[in-house]
Image (cartoon, rainbow, N blue to C red):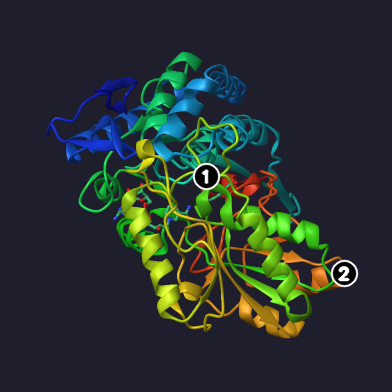
């Protein structure tokens, strides 16, 4: 059986404690690899390697050299595209058609975009007057923050991990990555690409394991890490924030969402249906930006519900290798238990199940997989947990509204504030509503349209800080002002 080891100081190493855990294929429930679980020793070795690398060749490299190496990392991912694709699809079960368009290309792009960004960002400077008339010049320079702890989730494993590692390295930091225990493979594979690209040993380190009382907690408790970037559940973000408080370490948190889609009667219905379909069901609903609450103006409510139902029922459920499949399993049986508990809760709370609501019939070879049906409900009360909790599954509830004010109030009614999608052809309404929605990311007549230069993150309990574009540089660097008396 294949073993997945830590990548520390440029070497693949096993755990001294001998602990291994299963890496399971969610398509059929079969174990595909054994993963080494890091103890405190491996985490400590990884942090020490990262610290030492800051003072080694990496820390002395010119920006041009660093940029060239990061471009090679991106090229290395593209050169081994099929290997990354296979690994990501085995870990997650997602359709290859999706991973080949989103996950792997973005995994590569994250290195190129941020390498170029760092090279082209302007410095700040201010001239000032002084009492003696000679004046002074201030200029600010960016310096790497140091060792960054990267804790990444399982829904878009390579994409979200490199979204952090790309800018962290571009800014000259070193990293210790703790990928999700569900999806360790592409993070491990990236070590080989780093080596081939000429990234010095100790710059990119990976430790595998779980969150609490395992690699994740050991990493956040380690005093020699300078900052943490995390994507995942809000409650985990709270734990990481507490750990980071010890020693006043910086954090960037991209947390849960319960995003609203607002569909106005003046929308282009075809666009609204297509966009809502993607935002509810792509990646089996496991996207933090996804729409689980859809609010539709009453005059078009029935038409919207019946058209969304028709489209949801056309989704083709199947494994990654099925070229026609556009809907895979959830990431694990454990996650399926959570999603199915909400499917049951919806019924208990009086929902009308428009479509789905259960487990699909799958051929015998996939019977052990984490399959669920795409599901749509109507008729739930606003305080049902199905409406208020992030389910992170392929499901949405549709509720009618009667006025723009009501739609905005409903969208803003929860403690989350990650993303929102507004469907209207009225440009004034689009601006007006976008301005009032309490969320970090608003799409109008689109969803998941990503420009990596833009600020990305959540408000309220959906996160702290923004990454993307120069905002990533804010987190991954320390600014130092130099004031020169002339
Ligand atoms: N992109 C997103 O916004 C994601 C949201 N979720 C949400 O979280 C729910 C639970 O999924 P999980 O994988 O359990 O998410 P999680 O937030 O527990 O895990 C994400 C990462 O954090 C690590 N982690 C967990 N506890 C930690 C701790 N105490 N210290 C340090 N690291 C820790 C995990 O090992 C993993 O690498 C999902 O049902 C979904 O609602 C999950 C994954 C991604
Ligand atoms: O495009 C991105 O950078 C990120 C997309 C999705 C997430 O952050 C998520 O699902 O967590």
In three-dimensional space, the C-alpha distance between marks 2 and 1, rounded to whole angstroms, equals 36 Å
Instruction: State the residue at coordinates (60%, 38%).
Output: 102
Q: Is mark 2 within 8 Å of ligand 2?
A: no
Name the mark nearer the viewer: 2 or 1. Answer: 1
Question: Would residue 444 be visible to someone looking at this image?
Answer: no
Instruction: State the residue at coordinates (56%, 31%).
Output: 104
Q: Secondary structure at mark 2?
A: loop
- Count of numbered circles on the image: 2
Q: How crowded is the residue under tag 1: few (<14 C-alpha within 10 Å), some, or many (20+)?
A: many
Q: Position of residue 55 (x, y in %)?
A: 39, 27
- Left or right of residue 370: residue 425: right
461 above or below 367?
Answer: below
Q: Tell me which label, 2 or 1, sits earlier in the chain.
A: 1
- Left or right of residue 75: residue 206: left
> Considering depth in this image, is 355 or 178 the residue closer to the camera?
355
Residue wearing tag 1: 317
358 above or below 152?
Answer: below
340 above or below 40?
Answer: below
Q: Position of residue 192 (x, y in %)?
A: 41, 19
- Left or right of residue 229: residue 480: right
Q: Position of residue 440 (x, y in %)?
A: 62, 63
Residue wearing tag 2: 426
- The circle on residue 484 is none
Question: Would residue 107 be visible to someone looking at this image?
Answer: yes
Looking at the rendering, in which quadrant would you find the C terminus? top right
Q: Position of residue 123 (x, y in %)?
A: 68, 42
Instruction: State the residue at coordinates (27%, 46%).
Output: 210
Q: Secondary structure at mark 1?
A: loop
Q: Residue furthest left?
A: 17
Is label 2 in contact with label 1 (beta carbons under 8 Å)? no
Q: How crowded is the residue under tag 2: few (<14 C-alpha within 10 Å), some, or many (20+)?
A: few
Looking at the rendering, in which quadrant would you find the N terminus? top left
């Amino acid at each position: 059986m294949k073993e997945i080891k830590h990548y520390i100081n440029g070497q693949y190493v096993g755990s001294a404690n001998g602990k291994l855990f299963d890496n399971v294929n969610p398509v059929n429930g079969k174990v595909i690899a054994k993963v080494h679980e890091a103890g405190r020793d491996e985490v400590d070795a990884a942090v020490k390697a990262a610290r030492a690398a800051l003072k080694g060749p990496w820390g002395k490299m010119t920006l041009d050299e660093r940029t060239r190496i990061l471009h090679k990392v991106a090229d290395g991912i593209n050169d081994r595209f099929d290997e990354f694709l296979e690994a990501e699809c085995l870990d997650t079960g997602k359709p290859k058609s999706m991973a080949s368009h989103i996950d792997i290309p973005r995994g590569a792009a994250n290195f190129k975009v941020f390498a170029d960004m760092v090279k082209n960002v302007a410095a700040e400077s201010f001239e000032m007057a002084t009492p003696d008339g000679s004046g002074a010049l201030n200029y600010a320079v960016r310096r790497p923050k140091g060792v960054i702890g990267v804790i990444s989730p399982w829904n878009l494993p390579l994409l979200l991990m490199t979204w952090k590692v790309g800018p962290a390295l571009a800014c000259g930091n070193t990293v210790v990555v703790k990928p999700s225990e569900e999806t360790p493979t592409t993070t491990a594979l990236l070590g080989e690409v780093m080596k081939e690209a000429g990234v010095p040993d100790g710059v990119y380190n990976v430790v595998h394991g779980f969150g609490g009382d395992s690699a994740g907690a050991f990493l956040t408790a380690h005093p020699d890490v300078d900052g943490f970037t995390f994507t995942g559940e809000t409650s985990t973000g709270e734990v990481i924030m507490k750990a980071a408080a010890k020693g006043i370490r910086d954090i960037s948190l991209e947390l849960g969402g319960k995003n609203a889609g607002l569909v106005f009667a003046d929308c282009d219905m075809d666009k609204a249906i297509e966009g809502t379909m993607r935002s509810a069901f792509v990646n089996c609903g496991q996207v933090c930006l996804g729409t689980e609450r859809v609010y539709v103006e009453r005059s078009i409510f029935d038409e919207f519900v019946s058209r969304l139902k028709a489209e949801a029922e056309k989704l083709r459920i199947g494994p990654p290798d099925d070229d026609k499949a556009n809907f895979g399993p959830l990431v694990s049986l454990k996650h399926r238990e959570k999603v199915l508990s909400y499917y049951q809760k919806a019924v208990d709370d009086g929902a009308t199940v428009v479509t789905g609501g259960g487990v699909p019939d799958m051929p015998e070879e996939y019977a052990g997989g984490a399959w669920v049906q795409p599901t749509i409900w109507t008729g739930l009360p606003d305080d049902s947990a199905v409406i208020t909790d992030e389910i992170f599954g392929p499901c949405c509830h549709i509720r009618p509204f009667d006025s723009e004010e009501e739609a905005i109030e409903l969208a803003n009614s929860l403690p989350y504030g990650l993303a929102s999608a507004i469907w209207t052809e009225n440009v004034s309404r689009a601006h007006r509503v976008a301005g009032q929605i309490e969320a970090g990311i608003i799409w109008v007549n689109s969803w998941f349209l990503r420009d990596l230069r833009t600020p990305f993150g959540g408000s309220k309990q959906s996160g702290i800080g923004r990454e993307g574009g120069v905002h990533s540089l804010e987190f991954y660097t320390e600014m130092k002002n130099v004031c020169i008396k002339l």
